[in-house]
Amino acid sequence: MFLIDRTSRKVTPLEQKSFISLAMSERRDLQEWIVDHPSILRESLLIIQKEFDGFPGTNERLDLLALDEAGRLVIIENKLDDSGRDVVWQALKYVSYCATLTKKQIIDIFQRYLGSSSIAEDKLCEFFDNADIESIRLNPSDGDQRIILVAANFRREVTATVLWLRDHGIDIKCIKVTPFQDGERLYLDIEQILPIQDIGEYQISLTNKKQEEAVSRKEEASRHTLRLEFWTQALPVIAERCPIFTNRSPSRDNWISGASGRSGVQIVPVILMHSARAEVYIDMGDWGKNKDLFDSLLHRRLIIEKSLGYELEWSRLTEKRGCRIFVGYSKSGLLDKENWSKVTEFLAEHVTSLYNCFLNVLTSI
């Protein structure tokens, strides 16, 4: 940090100091600076308690407890010249202790902090843009608690752990505080080192993307299990009506293929989340051959649908190699387990009729 002399147009370096060399303490100095000016932490916060020890069964206490503008609890841990090795673990413990705090408990904690000088509910309303206390959400279940670590220096093991936690969706940041001296004057430099502010939004977006992907993978695993359960009960019923599925095994996919008697043409029952379909799928490995066969079948559409007794959807799928001819069922699907028997009956009836019809048609083309 430099001092600018506008008259001489020169800069003079300020002397970087340590808090210990200045005889400053964590509680008497650093903590009180944050209490007086929470904006030191580079955001709008409402301090609701300091030295909070309301944890049953333990004598531990966190440095500062605050609320952010979203009503989330913020655990603030202060260290002086060295973050120490265990600051992250310590903060995570406090987060777990605070995670269950209700709105009423938070208001009571804040009121104890204020004493008789102010009314907690009034201060909360003021902080949340004069909202009614009833409409203010505190420690919402859809928003995790946050952590802010404050120190003059952060050990490598601490920053590595913070980066890992952020990468896994934990809202934690590191604020570096450095004292400087110019004669009798002291200055405090504040720097957010994690997440790096210039790329903070990028990191947040990347974290959100990873969280969405993790949720998607979990949902897909759940769908795999559900599909396997569906086909386990559905295949015996389908195979009894349509023998081409006799030797087929239950699958985690949303479809099971059966031979039509023509190479490259499959009879396929398909289960979707909210619907199902029975289809004839054409893929002989060649775009042109697939489209030619589809067009030939399409020329016989009236004959085919008259033989089946119902209309079909004809999808040439011009942008794809294969083609699809199908009949759909929109009343139920994979997620409606109570109606699996109805879906199964639909698939069994229609893959059987499609097989019998197209077996004859395909032999004539």
Image: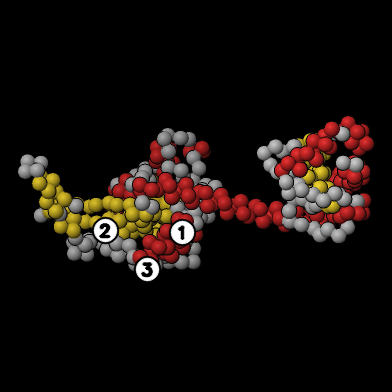
Q: Which amino acid does label 3 sit on?
A: Arg
Q: In the image, which is nearer the foreground, mark 3 or mark 1?
A: 1
Report helix, strand or loop for mark 3.
loop
Taking the spot 16% from the left edge, 50% from the top edge, the residue there is 2
Residue 361 vertical position relative to residue 337 in the rendered view, above or below: above
Q: What is the quadrant of the C terminus in the image?
A: top right
In the picture, measured across the screen, residue 95 lies left or right of residue 272, that is left
- The CA span between labels 1 and 2 is 30 Å
Residue 313 vertical position relative to residue 49 in the rendered view, above or below: above
Q: Closest to the observer: 4 or 116? A: 4
Q: In the image, which is nearer the foreground, mark 3 or mark 2?
A: 3
Q: What residue type is labelled 2?
A: Arg
- Sequence order check: which comes first, mark 3 or mark 2? 2
Q: Closest to the observer: 163 or 93? A: 163
Locate residue 185, reporting x and y percent.
14, 52
Taking the spot 65% from the left edge, 52% from the top edge, the residue there is 219
Residue at the spot of label 3: 85
Residue 28, which numbered label?
2
Q: Which amino acid does label 1 sit on?
A: Leu
